[in-house]
């Protein structure tokens, strides 16, 4: 393998600036002295510029807007849920407080209704905890349906 | 950075990476709708994983890798032929110098034809580096090969491309 063969194997990486400083300098020195290798290097550089200039089909603006709209909805959906849950929690909490302290309702009625509500909340939380636990162990959760 | 700001940053990146990624999907699938589906699904996957991907080269490399795998799945399932001759004329950019533009267009058409006839492995690495402007490290991640292999494969691919272009001149 002569000096030109050794340098030409490195020309591609030299073009991309991916050689070590030492190897880069060796190629640099050789290129100043060797017309043949310089021609190969210039061909590589021209081809790289030509490939960059190639044109391929693009999605239309309408198609792309539709794709991006899906992400905008997703980005704002989380905030929407947060607001909804926060407002619902405040309203329900206030309703329960007002009912529990309402002197016009008999004490046993208040206890019975509150127990009923507590039961529903406990069932909901239990189911939610189970779902979250199984989701955490589901290795297929990222698989598209 | 707040979550909202980070999400906006990811959206902005996905917008530019996705547009460029469409060309990559098209280069593999040669079908507009299939390419758009593959890009959209890969963007969704990137969105789902945005918390663990740093915006920038990491997200871009990850996105191209997912997109490439998805395109391979599409080719397998739909039996799409990579070399299917479904070439679309490049968009007309307007002619400032018709003679020069025609010559340049002819030159790029020839390059496109030569690229299309190259082995998939070679065409892919040339396009990832020179058209999509990915670094060697990013290409290594996308193709799941060592950086040294990227270097040698790219050298072989460029040498082959050069020989074939010179042979056709």
Image: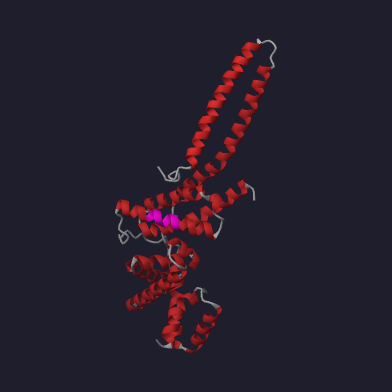
> Where does residue A24 sit, x and y in percent of width and height?
53, 80
User: What colour-coding does the image apply?
Assistant: secondary structure
Q: Residue at x 63, y 30 (%)?
A: A87
Quadrant of the image containing the C terminus of chain A: top left
| In-image side of A122 versus B103 (left or right) | right
Disc tally is 0
Up-down relation of residue B89 to residue B169 (above or below): above
**Front-lying residue, B69 or B28:** B69
> Where does residue A83 sit, x and y in percent of width and height?
61, 34
**Front-lying residue, A43 or A136:** A136
Q: Main secondary structure of the magenta part?
A: helix
Residue B83 on the magenta span: no
- Can residue B8 be seen at all in this image of the molecule? yes
Up-down relation of residue B28 to residue A3 (above or below): above
**Front-lying residue, A135 or B100:** A135
The answer to which quarter of the image holds residue A104 is: top right
Highlighted magenta segment, given as a residue range: B65-71
Up-down relation of residue B124 to residue A113 (above or below): below
> Where does residue B12 sit, x and y in percent of width and height?
56, 52
Q: Residue at x 51, y 76 (%)?
A: A19
Q: Residue at x 60, y 15 (%)?
A: A112
> Where does residue B53 sit, x and y in percent of width and height?
54, 54
**Front-lying residue, A68 or A85:** A85
């Amino acid at each position: 393998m002569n000096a030109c063969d050794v340098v030409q194997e490195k020309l591609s990486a030299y073009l991309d600036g991916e050689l070590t400083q030492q190897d880069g300098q060796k190629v640099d020195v050789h290129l100043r002295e060797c017309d043949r290798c310089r021609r190969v290097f210039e061909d590589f550089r021209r081809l790289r510029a030509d490939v960059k200039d190639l044109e391929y089909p693009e999605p239309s603006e309408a198609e792309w807007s539709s794709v991006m709209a899906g992400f905008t909805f997703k980005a704002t959906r989380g905030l929407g849920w947060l607001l909804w849950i926060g407002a619902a929690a405040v309203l329900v909490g206030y309703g329960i407080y007002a009912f529990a302290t309402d002197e016009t309702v008999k004490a046993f009625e208040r206890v019975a209704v509150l127990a009923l509500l507590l039961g529903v909340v406990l069932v909901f939380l239990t189911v939610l905890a189970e779902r979250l636990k199984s989701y955490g162990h589901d290795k297929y959760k990222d698989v598209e349906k | 950075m707040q979550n909202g700001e980070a999400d906006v940053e990811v959206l902005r990146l996905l917008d530019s990476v996705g547009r460029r990624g469409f060309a990559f999907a098209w280069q593999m699938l040669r079908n507009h709708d299939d390419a758009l589906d593959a890009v959209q699904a890969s963007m969704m996957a990137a969105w789902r994983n945005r918390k663990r991907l740093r915006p920038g080269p990491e997200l871009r490399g990850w996105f191209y890798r997912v997109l490439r795998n998805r395109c391979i799945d599409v080719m397998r399932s739909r039996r799409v032929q990579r070399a299917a001759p479904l070439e679309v004329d490049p968009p007309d950019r307007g002619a400032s110098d018709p003679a020069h533009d025609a010559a340049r267009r002819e030159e790029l058409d020839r390059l496109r034809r030569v690229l299309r006839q190259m082995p998939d492995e070679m065409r892919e690495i040339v396009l990832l580096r020179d058209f999509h402007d990915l670094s060697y490290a990013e290409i290594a991640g996308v193709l799941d090969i060592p950086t040294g292999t990227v270097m040698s494969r790219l050298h072989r691919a460029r040498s082959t491309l050069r020989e074939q272009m010179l042979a056709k001149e």
